[in-house]
Image (tube, grey):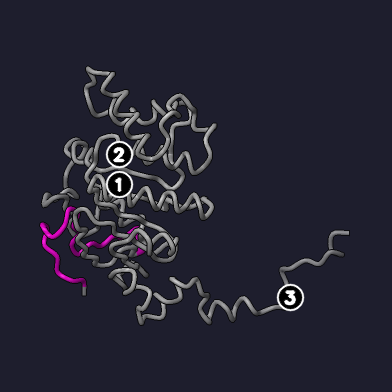
Amino acid sequence: MAKYVDKDDGVIVVKDLVKMFDRSIVLEGISLAFEKGKTTVVIGPSGCGKTVLMKHMIALERPTSGEVYFKGQRIDELNERRLAAIRTQYGFCFQKGALFDSLTVYENITFPIVQHRKISDWKAIDDLVKNKLAMVGMDGYQEHLPASLSGGQQKRVALARAIALNPEVILYDEPTTGLDPIRSDIINELILKLQRELQITSIVVTHDMKSAYKIGDRIIMLHDGRVIADGDADHIRNHPHSIVQQFVHGEVNEADLAALRLGGTKFETQYLPEDFK
């Protein structure tokens, strides 16, 4: 049974969250409160519901049953017009950056500002862009197109765009995917920096355990749509559940290993080289 949470227990709260697609249960009775100013990392195997959970936090998905709250206000029942203002308090950092290829770095960062604010002082906007890029070490790249940047630089620009509206929450979807260890650690350091300097609440979906241990004040593991572990890095490292240990150490379970070791079997549907002569 999911633990009890109150709508005011965190900046984002999900209560008894159930999500089904057709007859498949993706999230099964999840109740979680995400504390203001902290970084919560969500881990788990592919298909366990991590991204679906994140989408519920911003009402991009609506629950089959259950409730979602932002700063004490229920949002899963709001219409798109009322959600628009709430969503400006969120920043998003997508897995591949999701920059607009035809727009310069400057235009990418100002895009959410132009969409949501009436701009009367472009000098102030210039200063804002410079400030946001400086925070991620990319000031001076304003006129570059995304294609001219490395993968790590694109993610840093995407992070600058995510904080353009000074959000209270940033949602990160696999922020270090596709990066080498050094560039990955740069992203980790930037996540810590934004939390420290802006008091931003961060929720990070990742498979990168090195990153999870470094940035996470709290780590939650999902498996088959349920929370099976919830605590700090030491708690997760030493968790007694075998599924948790297999995941955090990247170990194949015995059943899968046995299947991989099977060999030399020829099935009737297989072809031999001579069949093509």
Percent coordinates x, y for residue 77 in the rendering: 17, 48
Report how far apart the C-alphas of labels 3 and 2 lie in the structure: 56 Å
Local packing at callout 3 (Cα closer than 10 Å; few below 14, some 14-19, many 20+) is: few
Region in magenta: 2-24
Viewer-nearest residue: 163 or 259: 163
Q: Earlier in the sequence, mark 3 or mark 2?
A: 2
Report how far apart the C-alphas of labels 1 and 2 lie in the structure: 9 Å
At x 70% / y 78%, what residue is drawn? 263
- What is the secondary structure assignment of the residue under circle 1? helix
Callouts 1 and 2 close, C-beta under 8 Å: yes
Q: Which residue is mark 1?
A: 194
Residue 222 lies in magenta, yes or no?
Answer: no
Q: Is residue 206 above or below residue 162?
A: below
Looking at the rendering, in which quadrant would you find the N terminus?
bottom left
Percent coordinates x, y for residue 258 in the rendering: 59, 81
Q: Which residue is mark 2?
A: 163
| Side of 6 relative to 274 (left or right) | left
Percent coordinates x, y for residue 174 in the rendering: 42, 53
Q: Is residue 270 above or below residue 180?
A: below
Q: Which residue is mark 3?
A: 266
Location of residue 66 (image quadrant): bottom left
Nearer mark to the viewer, of 3 and 2: 2
Local packing at callout 2 (Cα closer than 10 Å; few below 14, some 14-19, many 20+) is: many
Viewer-nearest residue: 74 or 20: 74
Q: Amino acid at mark 1?
A: Leu
Q: Earlier in the sequence, mark 1 or mark 2?
A: 2
Local packing at callout 1 (Cα closer than 10 Å; few below 14, some 14-19, many 20+) is: some
